[in-house]
Amino acid sequence: MFRCSEVVERASLLIDGDLGFWPRLNIKLHLAICRGCRAFVEQMRITHDLTAMAGALHDPAPSEEIAAALARRKMGPGKKA
């Protein structure tokens, strides 16, 4: 069974499904008895899922008003486009 530091090192691999059978089993055994590591891995899973969802969203182009405001801000005060 892994120590906490080993679980932390391999948590991303576990979440991504990139661990072999024995390392995955060792982590799951550790998680069964270690509340802190369970919370850590669960938080990493949540972060992973939210990041994947955010990456899947398509951000539309900014409106013309927003683009113009950004252009004015980039040019500096007192200058006109």
Image (tube, rainbow, N blue to C red):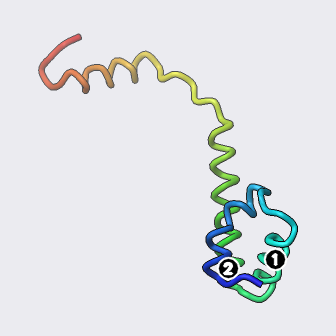
Position of residue 49 measured from the top left corner of the image (x, y, whole percent): 70, 53
Q: Are marks 2 and 1 in contact (CB under 8 Å)?
A: no
Q: Quadrant of the N terminus?
A: bottom right
Q: Nearer the viewer, residue 3 or 16?
A: 3
Tell me which numbered mark, 2 or 1, is placed earlier along the sequence.
1
Position of residue 55 measured from the top left corner of the image (x, y, whole percent): 63, 39
Disc 2 and disc 1: Cα gap in Å?
Answer: 10 Å
Number of residues whose C-alpha sits closer than 10 Å to that of mark 2, classed few (under 14), some (14–19) or many (20 or more): many
Residue of label 2: 37
The residue sitting at 65% across, 67% down in the picture is: 43
Q: Quadrant of the C terminus?
A: top left
Q: Is residue 13 left or right of residue 9?
A: right
Residue type pointed to by label 2: Cys
Residue of label 1: 28
Q: Is residue 63 left or right of residue 75?
A: right
Number of residues whose C-alpha sits closer than 10 Å to that of mark 1, classed few (under 14), some (14–19) or many (20 or more): some
Please say if 81 is above or below 28.
Answer: above
Does dot 1 land on a helix, a strand or a loop? helix
Q: Nearer the viewer, residue 73 or 20?
A: 20
Residue type pointed to by label 1: Lys
Position of residue 70 measured from the top left corner of the image (x, y, whole percent): 33, 25
The residue sitting at 25% across, 26% down in the picture is: 73
